Amino acid sequence: MKTSPIEKVAIRMTRFVGSPASLIIHTLLFAGAFMLVVFGIPIDRVLLVLTTIVSLEAIYLSIFIQMSVNRSERRIARVSREVHEIAEDVEEIQEDVQGIETDIDEIQKDVEEIQGDIEDIEENVDEIAEDVEGIEKDIDEIQSDVENIETDIDEIQKDSQ
């Protein structure tokens, strides 16, 4: 939010009034005002002028203070809105994290099932490999038997001739 030139002046004045330099200047001015009595100015006139100046200064100070309060209120409201938005974002992130945790749990279960399936497949492959070895042995035996039969047939044919 942009600040107007008047607000900028008010901000500077408020900062100055609350500074040590302002305290020193006010102390010197008040002391100087009472020193005017030494120079022949009647005390009632000095007090009248001093009271008027102090009253006007108090009015302006209260305005500056109220402006500072209003500015602080606006900042606090803006920060409060931002905090609320951040809190909503955090809630959404928490929901997302919970969803991710649920997904991870489901994926973990799926992985465990897949691992079980892989173990079953490995067992089946081992059994098939054993069966294939058995079949190969049977084929070798049959091949050997066929060769023996062929040899026997050849010999019988030679003998019958």
Image (spheres, rainbow, N blue to C red):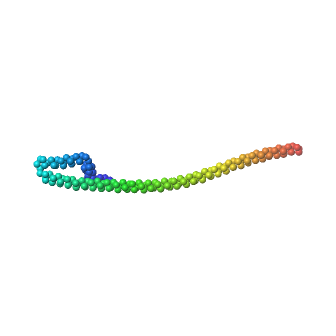
Residue drawn 12% across and 47% down?
38
**Residue 66 appears at what percent x and percent y?**
27, 55
Instruction: Identify the residue shown where x is 14% and y is 51%.
Output: 46
**Residue at the image position 17 percent from the left and 54 percent from the top:** 52
Write the residue at 25% across / 50% down. Answer: 17
Residue 23 visible in the snapshot: yes
Can residue 5 be seen in the rendering of this structure?
no
Horizontal arrangement in the rendering, residue 127 relative to residue 46 (left or right): right
Query: In the rendered picture of this protein, how many numbered marks are placed on residues?
Result: 0
Looking at the image, residue 8 sits to the left or right of residue 35; the answer is right
- Which one is in front, 161 or 85? 85
The image shows residue 78 at horizontal and vertical percentages of: 35, 55
Residue 62 image point, x, y percent? 25, 55
Residue 57 placement (x, y as % from top left): 21, 53
Instruction: Judge whether 159 appears above or below 61 on screen.
Output: above
Specify the quadrant that holds the C terminus: top right
Answer left or right for 27 relative to 84.
Answer: left
Residue at the left extreme, as displayed = 40
